[in-house]
């Protein structure tokens, strides 16, 4: 029989779980769905020598920051069935979410980066708390009754929790998803099953913009999409806000959603999005921050960090620039700025966006940062550089870190979606001539434990 304990929640952990302890015990218990101050009855699901993980059986006494989650699919101890794993902090009130995100950043900087005394600013809130996501990736599964399920994965699993609404998605996105599910059912499309290798439909990918328009992508296991014309016409008739419908093929047994093969079924090749005064064209698979309004807040902080202390730089590099949103946002603060991005489709979008916004001092290079940086350093040997980097969750690779320690780089503005890998990289750079001056957390992902940040690193010596 599984061990049951009564525990008090102390704080939130970097991975979004709550940290709890039983009275008189030093063992740490990680509990998903806990809130500081909660008194919980929990059941241990896995145990190590110094810590354990447990699930909540009963909420005995709520902590002061706990609230009733607005979404009916969010975890609750008394709710049967699997909970949606999408929004792990809906049970925390908004001020508490902001405080804990700053605390998580501090914990990573001090514990992983081994950096003390760094100024961690209060988390900047998102202008929107609900309905803020401009894209949704919805997996499909074949339900036991033979009907398609579309929703989000249960926490820690690949079990799809079927959903009819999602409070962090725009109404348009979920309306498209539900209509697509209905049409797929009527057309006889079956969900792909990775174990058996059977089925067609893997994901539905909907990207929306602030003008209430959408691009839709159907992701399948193989290239054949039966009765695609009927699907397109049915979806267009039901959702006239759709500007384009695309097909992506992901043939591999992988958790990576999008595959390498694309074709346009109908309509527009890209979607226009506005950030501040800038207008961008975004292809279906290109990277764009999922919270448009909060991205403006994030980019403003990056621009302030770049110009901190009144400094200006003749040359700025923007690594992992995607479709060039941050590059163009920063262009006015540099004599020349170069965006580097390995996704060639995104680079094409970036060039088009620079032209449509009349930005003349930006250029873009398609290629991996590890390969592009040596050539750039050879071509531009003199002067002081500033570098902006917004890498994937895995952080900066060792070759990129080594290039950034070259004396030409005087300032690094590091934008990160993962405080742990940011802290790791900041620790490396702090031992190689940089000092971490300041970190600004930004809440791009309300109702979740995820946090974006802008770190300012200065070269501390000649």
Image (cartoon, rainbow, N blue to C red):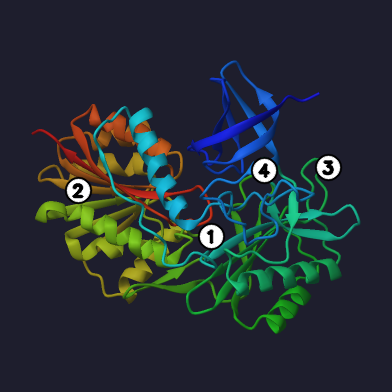
Q: Is residue 433 left or right of residue 216?
A: left
Q: In the rendered view, would you say 388 is above or below 327?
A: above
Residue at 32% from the left image edge and 44% from the top image edge: 372
Disc number lying in front (4 or 3) = 4
Disc number lying in front (3 or 2) = 2
Residue 393 vs residue 341, the one in the foreground: 393
Q: CA distance from mark 1 to mark 4?
A: 42 Å
Question: Which residue position is annotated with label 3?
Answer: 196
Kindly state the secondary structure of the residue where label 1 is placed: loop
Disc number lying in front (1 or 4) = 4
Disc number lying in front (1 or 2) = 2
Residue 337 vs residue 75, the one in the foreground: 75
Residue at 55% from the left image edge and 44% from the top image edge: 35
Question: Which residue position is annotated with label 4?
Answer: 59
Q: Earlier in the sequence, mark 3 or mark 2?
A: 3
Dividing the picture into quarters, in which one does residue 2 lie?
Answer: top right
Question: Which residue position is annotated with label 2?
Answer: 386
Residue 391 vs residue 168, the one in the foreground: 168
| Residue at the extreme right of the image, as rendered | 145
Q: Earlier in the sequence, mark 4 or mark 3?
A: 4
Residue 112: tell me if it is visible. no
Residue at 29% from the left image edge and 48% from the top image edge: 121
Q: CA distance from mark 1 to mark 3?
A: 27 Å
Disc number lying in front (2 or 4) = 4
Q: In the rendered view, would you say 164 is above or below 254?
A: below
Q: Earlier in the sequence, mark 1 or mark 2?
A: 1
Kindly state the secondary structure of the residue where label 3 is placed: loop
Residue 314 place in picture, x, y as percent: 13, 55
Q: In the rendered view, would you say 462 is above or below 127?
A: above
Dividing the picture into quarters, in which one does residue 3 lie?
Answer: top right
Q: CA distance from mark 2 to mark 4?
A: 51 Å
């Amino acid at each position: 029989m599984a061990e049951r304990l009564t525990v008090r929640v102390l704080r939130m952990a970097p991975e979004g779980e709550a940290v709890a302890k039983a009275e008189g015990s030093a063992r740490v218990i990680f509990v998903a769905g806990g809130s500081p101050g909660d008194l919980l009855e929990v059941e241990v699901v896995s145990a190590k020598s110094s810590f354990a993980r447990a699930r909540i059986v009963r909420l005995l006494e709520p902590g002061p920051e706990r609230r009733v989650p607005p979404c009916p699919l969010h975890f609750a101890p008394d709710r049967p069935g699997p909970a949606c794993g999408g929004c792990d902090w809906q049970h925390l009130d908004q001020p508490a979410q902001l405080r804990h995100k700053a605390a998580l950043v501090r914990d990573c900087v001090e514990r992983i980066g081994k950096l003390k005394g760094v100024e961690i600013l209060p988390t900047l809130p998102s202008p929107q708390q609900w309905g803020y996501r401009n894209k949704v990736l919805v997996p499909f599964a074949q339900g036991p009754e033979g009907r398609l399920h579309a929703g989000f994965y249960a926490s820690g699993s690949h079990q799809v929790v079927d959903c009819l609404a999602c409070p962090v998605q725009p109404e348009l996105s979920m309306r498209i998803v539900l209509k697509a599910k209905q049409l797929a059912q009527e057309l006889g499309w079956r969900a792909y099953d990775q174990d058996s290798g059977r089925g067609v439909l893997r994901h539905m990918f909907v990207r929306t913009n602030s003008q209430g328009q959408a691009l839709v992508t159907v992701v399948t296991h193989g290239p054949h999409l039966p009765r695609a014309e009927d699907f397109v016409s049915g979806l267009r008739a039901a959702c006239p806000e759709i500007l384009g419908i695309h097909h992506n093929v992901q043939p591999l047994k992988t958790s990576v959603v999008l595959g390498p093969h694309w074709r346009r079924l109908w309509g527009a090749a890209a979607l226009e999005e506005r950030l501040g005064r800038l207008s961008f064209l975004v292809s279906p698979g290109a990277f764009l921050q999922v919270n448009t309004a909060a991205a403006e807040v994030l980019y403003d902080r990056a621009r302030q960090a770049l110009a901190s202390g009144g400094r200006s730089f003749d040359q700025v590099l923007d690594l992992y620039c995607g479709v060039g949103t941050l590059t163009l946002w920063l262009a006015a603060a540099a004599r020349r700025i170069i965006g580097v991005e390995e996704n060639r489709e995104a680079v094409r979008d970036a060039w088009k966006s620079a032209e449509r916004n009349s930005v003349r001092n930006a250029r873009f290079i398609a290629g991996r940062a590890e390969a592009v940086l040596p050539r750039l350093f050879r071509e531009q040997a003199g002067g002081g550089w500033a570098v902006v980097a917004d890498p994937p969750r895995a952080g900066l690779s060792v070759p990129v870190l080594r290039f950034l320690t070259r004396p030409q780089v005087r300032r690094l503005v590091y934008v990160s979606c993962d405080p742990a890998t940011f802290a790791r990289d900041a620790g490396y750079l702090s031992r190689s001539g940089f000092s971490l001056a300041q970190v600004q957390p930004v809440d791009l992902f309300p109702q979740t434990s995820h946090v974006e940040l802008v770190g300012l690193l200065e070269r501390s010596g000649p």
